[in-house]
Amino acid sequence: MLELMLVPLVAALVLVGIHAYLGVHVIARGVIFVDLALAQMAALGYTAATLVGVEPGSTAAYAIGVGATLLGALILSLTRFEHEFITQEALIGILFVTASAATILLAAQAPRGAEHVEELLTGTLLWVTWPDVIRIGAIYLVLGLVYWILRRRFLTISLRPAEARTKGWRLGWWDFVFYALFGVVVTVSVAVAGVLLVFSFLVMPAVIAFLFTSRTGPLLGIAWASGTAATVLGLVISFSYDLPTGPVVVCAFALTVLLAFVVRRTWGGARGAERAP
């Protein structure tokens, strides 16, 4: 089993590594579904590429997927504004629904359209190869270096937006840079893991981390650790019982979140009891 699991496991852990970091930003910004929206834009790009005869997994397919995702990033950066009732999350939802509908419409015109949509949702993690892992790892290494160079600015904007405004930073521009880089990550991830699993990699480890701390270092540590644990659990269950890998890993992440809530409530209740007179 280890030989069959090794490549998907390494690929999944590479995905967890960068998505858990980005998830901290997403949770802090309160744009929980931005990943789904950009992932769906990438799926729309891949579907359009398939419809015009581009080979799946080719450079051209990736280019079209990235182009669609960058369009989504531009839309998100332009729609960040202060309003009493309209939040950016609502606009993200509109982008996601529109991209989903467009993907279904395009897929209906393509051969094996239903199968294509299913693959975009659940991914093909089980069939990933070592060359895929190396290519994905190289792309993420470059993007990770850019995020590290800009880490102070991005973290300030995400965690302390009022301070960023005081400094006179152009938040719209920096949002576009953040979402554009984010979009490239998502475009690469969706081709391997699918929309649902990419969302799980991004949001659930960060949610677990924020349950226990708000400090940057521990946040990342808890996110990476919980993401790794959930990924290993999901893959073991999938291989042991011959179940679809993507959905099983998503459910393993959900179980991990549930356990984290139980631990947090139990730990919090015990601490509260200790402080009570």
Image (tube, rainbow, N blue to C red):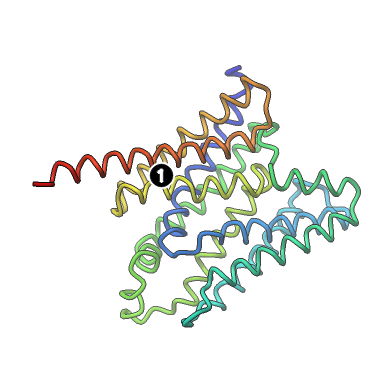
**Is 193 above or below relative to 37?**
above
Observer-nearest of 83 and 7: 83
Residue reaching furthest to the left: 277
**Residue in the picture at 45% in, 32% down:** 229
Observer-nearest of 9 and 83: 83
Tally the numbered discs: 1
Residue 48 placement: quadrant: bottom right
**Left or right, residue 47 beside residue 7:** right
Residue reaching furthest to the top: 1
- Element class at badge 1: helix
Where's residue 209, x and y in %? 37, 47
Where's residue 241, x and y in %? 64, 21
**Residue in the picture at 32% in, 43% down:** 265
Give the residue type that dot 1 points to: Ala
Residue reaching furthest to the front: 277
**Left or right, residue 126 beside residue 145:** right
Where's residue 204, x and y in %? 48, 47
Q: Quadrant of the N terminus?
A: top right
Observer-nearest of 86 and 21: 86
**Residue in the picture at 50% in, 79% down:** 85
**Is 117 above or below relative to 74?**
above
**Left or right, residue 218 beside residue 39:** left
**Is 86 above or below relative to 146?**
below
**Residue in the picture at 54% in, 65% down:** 179
- Which residue in the structure is indicated by mark 1? 223
Query: Circle 1: is it few (<14), some (14-19), or many (20+) Cα within 10 Å?
Result: many
Where's residue 185, x and y in %? 57, 53
